[in-house]
């Protein structure tokens, strides 16, 4: 594997003494609260309803006094209701479609774009990126924040950027090889697909110059990391973010690969119990909530991400002192409830990546027969397995079934399907078809 080198883009901010940082966060939080109280009707009326004024928020410890914000608020306030800056100061809109059709948009002032760029730059540098690098951006460009977000960060380290956007895998691979691309950014499922396609094309990864990849926008696991690293011979690093907060770069992994460093000079993370909505201590699993500090165009106070994860405050071996997020294990809302049991697609992925003879591509199909939920998991077998006997297939099917049942706590019908029959995605992978009418 070509060696990526750890770089800390902004040691002053990333390695800051945690007490000094907390002081700075409190100061920036006070400014943000005042800004939204003065400029955004929804925040002002909610704070009045909660019986608080900006004077009640003095330090980070007062955060829990503030009301939450959630995705429906963005839909209700579409398009400009949550903007805290005059329209003429907004220089960019990014957005995401959401699952219910109604778009949500985020507005950025030039300062917001610069801050977001700084956040992604730290991620590119942490993956070893510098002006020596050629970075292929395979996230979609457009309203989706992935393409432009990574583009800005890679440009800022001085790298040569190849703005491919998503799609056309063979062309992606030809560019990567031809230009001697050293770093790539895309979803982890697409990185896997690129790696598999390189093999199928009969190309040798030794003829590529790739050293690192920055992968995010969907949940993935260490097993998938290992596969990508093996296929592409790179360091595969995680990056997290969401449109409502800025886009990619809210947090990012360093080469230690022990969680994603939250850019705490721009956002304050919290973990809450999604049922009681009470804050949880570091180390406990719960829903991630972010407040932006410093964002002007569309500040967010206590925004509920619905992403489930844990936070860890210990200083990292890389030297950064920022809080680290564990991998996102799923979303409270892509969580399936099957016969009363909470099930996440990421659990199925973990099972499959530990079994020989199957690929990590799968589809979960849920139906309701009478009043009983039925889960079917369609699993692709590998080419090698295809040549095996029917009884070997039956053994495999049984093995998957048993492991799924013990890991998920619910039984599933396992359907083995031919290689390459489960759809591949250039953007975020969709792993669930829920046919139940609840
Ligand atoms: O996915 C921003 C992004 C682009 C992040 C490129 C990383 C790389 P949205 O489309 O608004 O923004 O989707 C945000 O995607 O709440 C998570 O559920 C999920 N997500 C994003 N990054 C990760 C990750 C972009 N590293 C939603 N691991 C978030 C797991 C992720 N889930």
Image (spheres, rainbow, N blue to C red):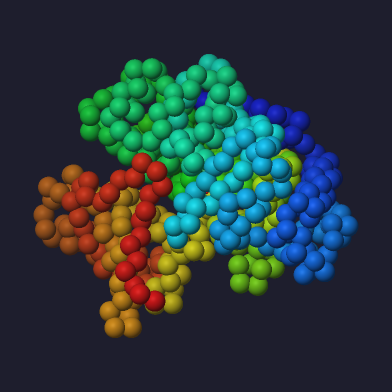
Residue at screen point 82% across, 42% down: 24
- Measuring from the top left, give residue 346's x and y in whole percent: 43, 56
Left or right: residue 276 compared with residue 39: left
Q: Residue at x 41, y 33 (%)?
A: 165
The answer to whether 199 is drawn above or below residue 86 in the figure is above
Q: Vertically, is 376 above or below 207? A: below
Quadrant in which the N terminus appears: top left
Identify the image quadrant of residue 285: bottom right
Query: Is 282 or 296 nearer to us in this picture?
Result: 296
Quadrant position of the C terminus in the picture: bottom left
**In the rendered image, which quarter is residue 396 located in?**
bottom left
The residue at the point 36 percent across, 41 percent down is: 426
Q: Position of residue 32 (x, y in %)?
A: 77, 48
Spot the residue most to the right: 55
x 35%, y 22%: residue: 175
Q: Is residue 420 left or right of residue 169?
A: left
Q: Residue furthest front?
A: 88
Q: Is residue 78 left or right of residue 414?
A: right
The answer to whether residue 290 shows anywhere in this view is no
Give how far across and how far down residue 409 sits, in percent. 40, 71
Q: How many marks?
A: 0
Q: Nearer the viewer, residue 269 or 29?
A: 29
Q: Residue 66 location, x and y as percent?
A: 76, 62
In this rendering, would 42 be left or right of 385?
Answer: right
- Examine the rendered structure and indicate whether residue 95 appears above or below residue 172: below
Residue that lies at the very extreme toward the bottom in this rendered image: 370
């Amino acid at each position: 594997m070509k060696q990526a080198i750890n770089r800390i883009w902004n040691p002053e901010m990333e390695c800051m003494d945690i007490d000094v940082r907390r002081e700075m966060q409190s100061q920036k939080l006070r400014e943000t609260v005042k800004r939204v109280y003065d400029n955004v009707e929804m925040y002002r009326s909610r704070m009045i309803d909660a019986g608080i004024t900006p004077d009640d928020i003095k330090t980070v410890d007062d955060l829990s006094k503030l009301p939450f914000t959630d995705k429906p608020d963005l839909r209700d306030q579409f398009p400009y209701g949550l903007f805290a800056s005059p329209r003429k100061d907004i220089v960019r809109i990014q957005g995401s479609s959401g699952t219910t059709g109604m778009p949500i948009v985020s507005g950025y002032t030039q300062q917001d774009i610069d801050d977001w760029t700084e956040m992604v730059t730290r991620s590119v540098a942490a993956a070893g990126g510098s002006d020596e690098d050629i970075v292929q951006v395979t996230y979609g460009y457009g309203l989706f924040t992935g393409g432009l977000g990574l583009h800005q960060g890679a440009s800022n380290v001085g790298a040569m950027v190849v703005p491919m956007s998503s799609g056309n895998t063979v062309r992606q691979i030809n560019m990567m090889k031809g230009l001697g691309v050293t770093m790539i950014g895309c979803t982890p499922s697409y990185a896997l697909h690129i790696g598999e396609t390189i093999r199928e094309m009969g190309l040798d990864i030794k003829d590529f110059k790739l050293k690192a990849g920055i992968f995010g926008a969907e949940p993935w696991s260490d097993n998938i990391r290992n596969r990508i690293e093996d296929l592409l011979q790179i360091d595969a690093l995680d990056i997290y973010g969401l449109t409502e907060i800025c886009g990619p770069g809210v947090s990012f992994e360093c080469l230690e690969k022990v969680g994603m460093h939250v850019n705490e000079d721009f956002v304050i993370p919290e973990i809450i119990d999604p049922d009681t909505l009470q804050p949880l201590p570091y180390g406990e699993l719960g829903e991630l909530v972010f407040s932006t500090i410093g964002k002007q165009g569309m500040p967010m106070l206590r925004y509920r991400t619905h992403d489930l994860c844990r936070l860890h405050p210990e200083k990292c071996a890389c030297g950064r002192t920022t809080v680290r997020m564990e991998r996102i294990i799923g979303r409270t809302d892509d969580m399936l409830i099957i016969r009363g049991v909470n099930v996440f697609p990421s659990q199925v992925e973990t099972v499959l990546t530990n079994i020989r003879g199957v690929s990590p591509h799968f589809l979960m199909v849920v139906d309701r027969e009478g009043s009983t939920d039925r889960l079917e998991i369609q699993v692709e077998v590998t080419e090698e397995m295809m040549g095996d006997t029917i009884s070997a297939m039956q053994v495999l099917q049984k093995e998957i079934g048993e492991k799924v049942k013990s890991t998920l706590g619910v039984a599933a019908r396992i359907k083995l399907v031919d290689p390459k029959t489960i759809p591949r995605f250039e953007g975020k992978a969709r792993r669930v078809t829920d046919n139940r009418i609840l």
